[in-house]
Image: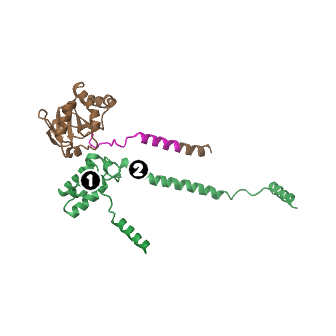
Chain colours: A green, B brown
Amino acid sequence: MRRLLSLCVLALTLALAAPATAVQPDEKLADPALEARARTIGKQLRCLVCQNQSIDESDAGLARDLRLLVRERLTAGASDAEVIDHVVARYGDYVLLRPPVKPATYPLWAAPVLILAGGIVVLALAWRRRRRVPDTAPLSDEERRRLDRLLEDDAP
Amino acid sequence: MRLRFLLPALLFAAVAVAFAVGLGLDPRRVPSPLIDKPAPGFALAPLLDDRPGLATADLRGQVALVNVFASWCIPCRAEHPLLMRLAETEGVTVFGINYKDKPEDARAWLAELGNPYRRIGIDRDGKAGIDWGVYGVPESFVVDAQGRIRFKWVGPMAPHILEEKILPILREVAG
């Protein structure tokens, strides 16, 4: 019973643990739909100060400024894509946590596929070689006679 | 037959070279999309009574180094003597953007260390900084006489950076 209770408490705690965000109450927009769009955009934009956090998660001053900028543009009626383009125009593709697919990033996107394909080729070659092992040439007459002689010698 | 043993060694060497190059790169230096583009539209109020503020139109007509600085920024202090040298010895036009700073702190800072800036604009909320793609002060931009951004340096300039990068680019842009 106690165990069940503690499990329930644990489950509840985990369920209530909201995903980390750095958005402060004073930044939030009154319109929940607009605020939700701002959050979605914020999660896609990299904070250039911390580099591996989105501006939605980062406590850096610049992240806050960018969150406010995103909300300002949205309030002004910009579409999600326009807001993202606005930030990319200033900070480059690097602010996008998901790199765009374009000639400069083809190697990046192709690498996993190419490496997987390479692995499959190596495995296929190794497998073919293993299968070839059983069909070795049968013993020649000379070898067979020698084998028989060895076996006879061993006989008691 | 020889190739079968050589191939993994070659692959290893290639990956090792790629990683060695990658480790040598500075992840803090993000290429700016603003290079060779006109400077962003902005207009900032003056910080000092005897020096004008800074706006887009002020960037036309001369080659200038636009330096983004703040009194709270420790590397800016390290960089400051080089800006003084650029302005006083090298005869470079240096403009300042005072980024997310208290104006009184910035004025005290310049009074203490000297003022290399021909014009200084106050960017209290960092909006102009965002338009310039600023993410880590100090940052310096070389802007040509047509008001186009030609080069960007993120972080404090060091003497060898000044000699090897900034001054040659300033000379080249001045043509």
Tag 2, which secondary structure? helix
**Amino acid of disc 1:** Ile
What residue span does the magenta drawing correspond to? B11-35
Q: Which percent across, then down, holds residue B104? A: 16, 39
Does residue B60 appear in the picture of this structure?
Answer: no
**For residue A108, which numbered disc appears in the image?**
2
Q: Quadrant of residue B168?
A: top left
**A56 lies above or below A11:** above
Task: Give the letter of the chain under mark 2.
Answer: A
Q: How many marks?
A: 2
Disc 1 or 2, which lies upstream in sequence?
1
The structure residue drawn at horizontal position 48% and vertical position 40%, both measured from the top left corner, is B17
Q: Quadrant of the N terminus of chain B?
A: top right
Q: Nearer the viewer, mark 1 or mark 2?
A: 1
**B83 lies above or below A94:** above
Magenta region includes residue B45: no
A45 lies left or right of B3 = left
Q: Quadrant of the C terminus of chain B?
A: top left
The residue closer to the viewer here, B39 or A44, is A44
The residue closer to the viewer here, B151 or A135, is B151
The residue closer to the viewer here, B147 or B119, is B119
Residue at the bottom extreme of this rendering: A1
Q: CA distance from mark 1 to mark 2?
A: 21 Å
Residue marked by disc 1: A84
Magenta region includes residue B18: yes
The structure residue drawn at horizontal position 24% and vertical position 53%, both measured from the top left corner, is A67
Classify mark 1: residues with Cα within 10 Å, few (<14), some (14-19) or many (20+): some
Residue at the left extreme of this rendering: B49
Q: Which percent across, then down, holds residue A121? A: 54, 54
